[in-house]
Protein backbone atom coordinates (compact mmCIF):
# COMPACT_ATOMS: atom_id res chain seq x y z
CA UNK A 1 0.00 0.00 0.00
CA UNK A 2 2.79 2.43 0.91
CA UNK A 3 4.57 1.64 -2.35
CA UNK A 4 1.38 2.39 -4.33
CA UNK A 5 1.05 5.81 -2.62
CA UNK A 6 4.65 6.65 -3.51
CA UNK A 7 4.09 5.61 -7.12
CA UNK A 8 0.87 7.65 -7.24
CA UNK A 9 2.62 10.77 -5.89
CA UNK A 10 5.49 10.39 -8.35
CA UNK A 11 3.04 9.99 -11.21
CA UNK A 12 1.04 13.07 -10.16
CA UNK A 13 4.24 15.11 -9.81
CA UNK A 14 5.44 13.97 -13.21
CA UNK A 15 2.14 14.84 -14.90
CA UNK A 16 2.06 18.27 -13.18
CA UNK A 17 5.60 18.98 -14.32
CA UNK A 18 4.71 17.95 -17.86
CA UNK A 19 1.66 20.21 -17.80
CA UNK A 20 3.64 23.22 -16.58
CA UNK A 21 6.31 22.61 -19.22
CA UNK A 22 3.62 22.41 -21.89
CA UNK A 23 1.94 25.58 -20.66
CA UNK A 24 5.21 27.51 -20.88
CA UNK A 25 6.10 26.00 -24.26
CA UNK A 26 2.64 26.86 -25.55
CA UNK A 27 3.48 30.54 -25.19
CA UNK A 28 1.47 33.44 -23.81
CA UNK A 29 -1.47 33.05 -26.19
CA UNK A 30 -0.97 36.52 -27.67
CA UNK A 31 -3.22 37.14 -30.67
CA UNK A 32 -1.46 40.17 -32.13
CA UNK A 33 0.25 39.44 -35.43
CA UNK A 34 3.65 40.44 -34.04
CA UNK A 35 4.94 41.14 -30.55
CA UNK A 36 8.16 41.82 -28.70
CA UNK A 37 8.96 42.07 -24.99
CA UNK A 38 12.33 43.50 -23.96
CA UNK A 39 13.95 44.39 -20.65
CA UNK A 40 14.06 48.20 -20.71
CA UNK A 41 17.47 48.34 -19.04
CA UNK A 42 19.45 45.49 -20.59
CA UNK A 43 17.47 45.18 -23.86
CA UNK A 44 17.38 41.41 -23.33
CA UNK A 45 14.60 39.88 -25.45
CA UNK A 46 12.07 38.13 -23.20
CA UNK A 47 9.47 37.13 -25.78
CA UNK A 48 9.11 37.56 -29.50
CA UNK A 49 6.88 36.62 -32.40
CA UNK A 50 7.47 37.98 -35.88
CA UNK A 51 10.50 39.56 -37.48
CA UNK A 52 11.72 42.35 -35.15
CA UNK A 53 13.49 44.12 -38.04
CA UNK A 54 10.54 44.18 -40.46
CA UNK A 55 9.16 47.71 -41.02
CA UNK A 56 5.41 47.98 -40.47
CA UNK A 57 2.88 50.83 -40.37
CA UNK A 58 2.68 52.07 -36.78
CA UNK A 59 -0.21 54.57 -36.86
CA UNK A 60 -0.40 56.84 -33.79
CA UNK A 61 2.56 55.27 -32.03
CA UNK A 62 4.23 57.93 -34.20
CA UNK A 63 3.14 60.48 -31.60
CA UNK A 64 5.84 59.32 -29.18
CA UNK A 65 8.45 60.52 -31.68
CA UNK A 66 6.43 63.71 -32.17
CA UNK A 67 6.63 64.30 -28.41
CA UNK A 68 10.39 63.80 -28.39
CA UNK A 69 10.88 66.33 -31.21
CA UNK A 70 8.62 68.85 -29.45
CA UNK A 71 10.58 68.53 -26.20
CA UNK A 72 13.94 68.66 -27.99
CA UNK A 73 12.96 72.03 -29.49
CA UNK A 74 12.52 73.48 -25.96
CA UNK A 75 9.73 75.78 -27.05
CA UNK A 76 7.68 77.18 -24.12
CA UNK A 77 5.13 74.61 -23.01
CA UNK A 78 2.84 77.35 -21.69
CA UNK A 79 2.78 79.15 -25.07
CA UNK A 80 -0.67 79.12 -26.66
CA UNK A 81 -1.04 77.62 -30.12
CA UNK A 82 -4.08 77.79 -32.40
CA UNK A 83 -5.86 74.98 -34.22
CA UNK A 84 -6.56 75.82 -37.88
CA UNK A 85 -8.11 73.99 -40.82
CA UNK A 86 -4.55 73.09 -41.86
CA UNK A 87 -4.50 70.67 -38.89
CA UNK A 88 -7.56 68.73 -40.08
CA UNK A 89 -7.06 65.14 -41.20
CA UNK A 90 -7.04 64.99 -45.02
CA UNK A 91 -5.83 61.37 -45.10
CA UNK A 92 -8.27 59.35 -43.00
CA UNK A 93 -10.94 61.94 -42.29
CA UNK A 94 -10.75 61.50 -38.52
CA UNK A 95 -12.50 64.05 -36.32
CA UNK A 96 -11.56 65.96 -33.19
CA UNK A 97 -13.26 68.26 -30.66
CA UNK A 98 -10.43 70.73 -31.35
CA UNK A 99 -12.21 72.88 -33.93
CA UNK A 100 -10.49 75.59 -35.95
CA UNK A 101 -9.89 78.65 -33.82
CA UNK A 102 -9.39 76.71 -30.58
CA UNK A 103 -6.41 77.96 -28.60
CA UNK A 104 -4.58 75.73 -26.14
CA UNK A 105 -1.13 75.63 -24.62
CA UNK A 106 1.62 73.55 -26.17
CA UNK A 107 1.52 71.45 -23.00
CA UNK A 108 -2.22 70.78 -23.42
CA UNK A 109 -1.74 69.85 -27.08
CA UNK A 110 1.06 67.45 -26.17
CA UNK A 111 -1.05 65.87 -23.44
CA UNK A 112 -4.12 65.19 -25.61
CA UNK A 113 -1.90 63.96 -28.45
CA UNK A 114 -0.28 61.38 -26.16
CA UNK A 115 -3.18 60.48 -23.90
CA UNK A 116 -6.18 60.75 -26.24
CA UNK A 117 -4.21 60.37 -29.50
CA UNK A 118 -5.73 63.56 -30.90
CA UNK A 119 -4.51 64.06 -34.47
CA UNK A 120 -5.20 67.79 -34.75
CA UNK A 121 -3.17 68.43 -31.60
CA UNK A 122 -0.20 66.57 -33.11
CA UNK A 123 -0.52 68.42 -36.41
CA UNK A 124 -0.71 71.80 -34.64
CA UNK A 125 2.40 71.01 -32.60
CA UNK A 126 4.28 70.31 -35.82
CA UNK A 127 2.93 73.40 -37.57
CA UNK A 128 4.10 75.64 -34.70
CA UNK A 129 7.62 74.19 -34.87
CA UNK A 130 10.37 76.49 -36.26
CA UNK A 131 10.12 76.08 -40.03
CA UNK A 132 6.64 74.53 -39.87
CA UNK A 133 5.45 71.00 -40.44
CA UNK A 134 7.95 70.16 -43.19
CA UNK A 135 10.86 71.04 -40.89
CA UNK A 136 9.21 69.10 -38.09
CA UNK A 137 8.94 65.92 -40.18
CA UNK A 138 12.60 66.27 -41.19
CA UNK A 139 13.48 66.57 -37.49
CA UNK A 140 11.45 63.42 -36.79
CA UNK A 141 13.49 61.41 -39.27
CA UNK A 142 16.76 62.86 -37.96
CA UNK A 143 15.73 61.97 -34.40
CA UNK A 144 14.78 58.44 -35.46
CA UNK A 145 18.19 57.99 -37.06
CA UNK A 146 19.89 59.30 -33.91
CA UNK A 147 17.98 56.72 -31.87
CA UNK A 148 19.15 53.92 -34.14
CA UNK A 149 15.72 53.32 -35.68
CA UNK A 150 17.22 51.86 -38.85
CA UNK A 151 14.02 50.65 -40.49
CA UNK A 152 11.82 53.68 -39.80
CA UNK A 153 10.42 56.44 -41.99
CA UNK A 154 8.02 59.25 -41.13
CA UNK A 155 5.98 61.56 -43.34
CA UNK A 156 3.50 63.07 -40.87
CA UNK A 157 3.46 63.84 -37.12
CA UNK A 158 0.15 62.14 -36.28
CA UNK A 159 0.66 58.69 -37.79
CA UNK A 160 -2.18 59.00 -40.28
CA UNK A 161 -0.15 57.95 -43.30
CA UNK A 162 0.63 54.25 -43.85
CA UNK A 163 4.06 55.48 -44.96
CA UNK A 164 4.91 56.07 -41.29
CA UNK A 165 6.70 52.79 -40.65
CA UNK A 166 9.08 51.27 -38.11
CA UNK A 167 10.16 47.82 -37.01
CA UNK A 168 9.48 46.35 -33.58
CA UNK A 169 13.17 46.78 -32.76
CA UNK A 170 12.86 50.45 -33.79
CA UNK A 171 9.86 50.89 -31.49
CA UNK A 172 11.79 49.45 -28.56
CA UNK A 173 14.39 52.18 -29.11
CA UNK A 174 11.67 54.83 -29.42
CA UNK A 175 9.87 53.73 -26.25
CA UNK A 176 13.13 53.52 -24.33
CA UNK A 177 14.00 57.10 -25.32
CA UNK A 178 10.51 58.38 -24.48
CA UNK A 179 10.66 56.60 -21.12
CA UNK A 180 13.55 58.88 -20.12
CA UNK A 181 11.17 61.88 -20.15
CA UNK A 182 9.00 62.23 -17.02
CA UNK A 183 6.57 64.47 -18.94
CA UNK A 184 5.92 61.82 -21.60
CA UNK A 185 5.49 59.16 -18.93
CA UNK A 186 3.04 61.41 -17.08
CA UNK A 187 0.99 62.63 -20.06
CA UNK A 188 0.74 59.26 -21.77
CA UNK A 189 -0.63 57.52 -18.67
CA UNK A 190 -3.16 60.08 -17.46
CA UNK A 191 -6.75 58.85 -17.49
CA UNK A 192 -8.37 62.08 -18.67
CA UNK A 193 -8.00 65.83 -18.98
CA UNK A 194 -10.26 68.79 -19.70
CA UNK A 195 -9.46 71.37 -22.37
CA UNK A 196 -11.35 74.56 -23.18
CA UNK A 197 -12.28 74.64 -26.88
CA UNK A 198 -14.34 77.07 -28.96
CA UNK A 199 -17.39 74.97 -28.05
CA UNK A 200 -16.65 74.99 -24.33
CA UNK A 201 -14.96 72.56 -21.98
CA UNK A 202 -14.23 69.14 -23.49
CA UNK A 203 -13.16 66.05 -21.57
CA UNK A 204 -10.50 63.93 -23.31
CA UNK A 205 -10.02 60.34 -22.14
CA UNK A 206 -7.15 57.92 -22.61
CA UNK A 207 -7.39 55.53 -25.55
CA UNK A 208 -5.87 52.81 -23.35
CA UNK A 209 -8.09 51.12 -20.76
CA UNK A 210 -5.03 49.79 -18.93
CA UNK A 211 -4.35 53.21 -17.40
CA UNK A 212 -7.71 52.81 -15.61
CA UNK A 213 -6.94 49.26 -14.50
CA UNK A 214 -4.96 48.75 -11.30
CA UNK A 215 -4.22 45.11 -12.13
CA UNK A 216 -1.47 46.07 -14.57
CA UNK A 217 0.78 49.07 -13.80
CA UNK A 218 1.66 51.13 -16.86
CA UNK A 219 4.58 53.59 -16.73
CA UNK A 220 4.29 54.76 -20.37
CA UNK A 221 1.96 53.82 -23.19
CA UNK A 222 0.78 54.71 -26.67
CA UNK A 223 -1.96 53.15 -28.76
CA UNK A 224 -2.37 53.32 -32.51
CA UNK A 225 -4.92 52.35 -35.14
CA UNK A 226 -5.28 52.62 -38.88
CA UNK A 227 -6.62 50.09 -41.35
CA UNK A 228 -3.11 49.40 -42.59
CA UNK A 229 -1.47 49.11 -39.15
CA UNK A 230 -4.28 47.38 -37.30
CA UNK A 231 -4.60 48.01 -33.58
CA UNK A 232 -1.20 48.57 -32.01
CA UNK A 233 0.15 49.20 -28.54
CA UNK A 234 3.49 49.96 -26.95
CA UNK A 235 3.99 50.31 -23.20
CA UNK A 236 6.35 49.99 -20.27
CA UNK A 237 5.25 47.79 -17.38
CA UNK A 238 7.10 46.04 -14.54
CA UNK A 239 7.81 42.35 -15.04
CA UNK A 240 9.36 40.70 -11.98
CA UNK A 241 10.01 44.25 -10.70
CA UNK A 242 11.99 45.26 -13.80
CA UNK A 243 10.73 47.86 -16.34
CA UNK A 244 9.83 45.98 -19.50
CA UNK A 245 8.91 47.26 -22.96
CA UNK A 246 6.01 45.61 -24.80
CA UNK A 247 5.39 46.10 -28.52
CA UNK A 248 2.12 44.64 -29.86
CA UNK A 249 1.33 45.17 -33.55
CA UNK A 250 -1.73 44.48 -35.68
CA UNK A 251 -4.12 43.06 -33.12
CA UNK A 252 -7.17 41.56 -34.78
CA UNK A 253 -9.89 42.96 -32.51
CA UNK A 254 -10.74 46.22 -30.77
CA UNK A 255 -9.93 44.86 -27.31
CA UNK A 256 -7.27 42.30 -28.24
CA UNK A 257 -4.21 44.50 -27.72
CA UNK A 258 -5.29 45.19 -24.12
CA UNK A 259 -5.87 41.51 -23.37
CA UNK A 260 -2.62 40.64 -25.18
CA UNK A 261 -0.64 42.95 -22.89
CA UNK A 262 -2.18 41.19 -19.87
CA UNK A 263 -1.50 37.75 -21.36
CA UNK A 264 2.12 38.59 -22.12
CA UNK A 265 2.87 40.05 -18.71
CA UNK A 266 1.22 37.16 -16.85
CA UNK A 267 3.11 34.59 -18.92
CA UNK A 268 6.45 36.34 -18.39
CA UNK A 269 5.86 36.44 -14.63
CA UNK A 270 4.42 32.95 -14.13
CA UNK A 271 5.26 30.88 -17.21
CA UNK A 272 1.54 30.09 -17.51
CA UNK A 273 -1.21 31.28 -19.85
CA UNK A 274 -3.47 33.96 -18.35
CA UNK A 275 -6.73 32.44 -17.00
CA UNK A 276 -9.70 33.31 -19.19
CA UNK A 277 -11.53 35.15 -16.38
CA UNK A 278 -8.56 37.52 -15.96
CA UNK A 279 -8.71 38.49 -19.63
CA UNK A 280 -12.13 40.04 -19.21
CA UNK A 281 -12.86 43.62 -18.21
CA UNK A 282 -11.35 46.95 -19.11
CA UNK A 283 -13.22 49.86 -20.57
CA UNK A 284 -13.61 50.75 -24.18
CA UNK A 285 -10.45 51.85 -25.94
CA UNK A 286 -9.84 54.02 -28.97
Image (cartoon, rainbow, N blue to C red):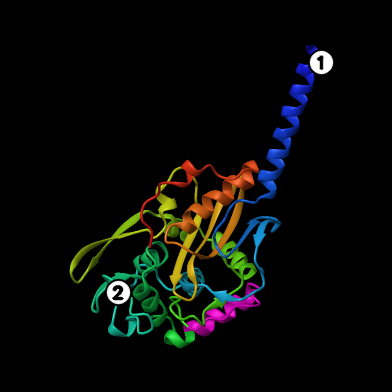
Image position, residue 50 (x, y; %): 65, 66
- Mark 1 to mark 2: distance in Å? 73 Å
Farthest residue, direction left: 199
Using the image, tell me which numbered label, if any, was put on residue 3: 1
Image position, residue 147 (x, y; %): 63, 72
Segment tinted magenta in the rendering: 136-155
Mark 2 crowd level (few <14, some 14–19, many ≥20, 10 Å Cα) = few
Is 148 part of what is drawn in magenta? yes
Q: Quadrant of the C terminus?
A: bottom left
Looking at the image, residue 242 lies above or below residue 248: above
Farthest residue, direction top: 1
Image position, residue 90 (x, y; %): 35, 84
Q: Quadrant of the N terminus?
A: top right
Nearer-the-camera pick, 249 or 62: 249
Q: Helix or strand or loop: what does disc 1 sit on? A: helix
For the point 36% across and 56% down, the residue is 284
Tell me if 147 is positioned left or right of 120 in this view. Answer: right
Q: Helix or strand or loop: what does disc 2 sit on? A: loop
Amino acid sequence: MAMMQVIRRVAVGFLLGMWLSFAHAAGPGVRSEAYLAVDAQTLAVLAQHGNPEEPRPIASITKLLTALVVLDAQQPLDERITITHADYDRIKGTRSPLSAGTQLTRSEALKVALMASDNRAAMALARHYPGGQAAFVRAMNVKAKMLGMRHSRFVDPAGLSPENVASMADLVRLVRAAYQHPLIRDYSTQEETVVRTRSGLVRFRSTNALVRNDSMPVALQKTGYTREAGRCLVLVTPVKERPTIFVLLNSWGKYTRIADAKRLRYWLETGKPLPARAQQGGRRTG
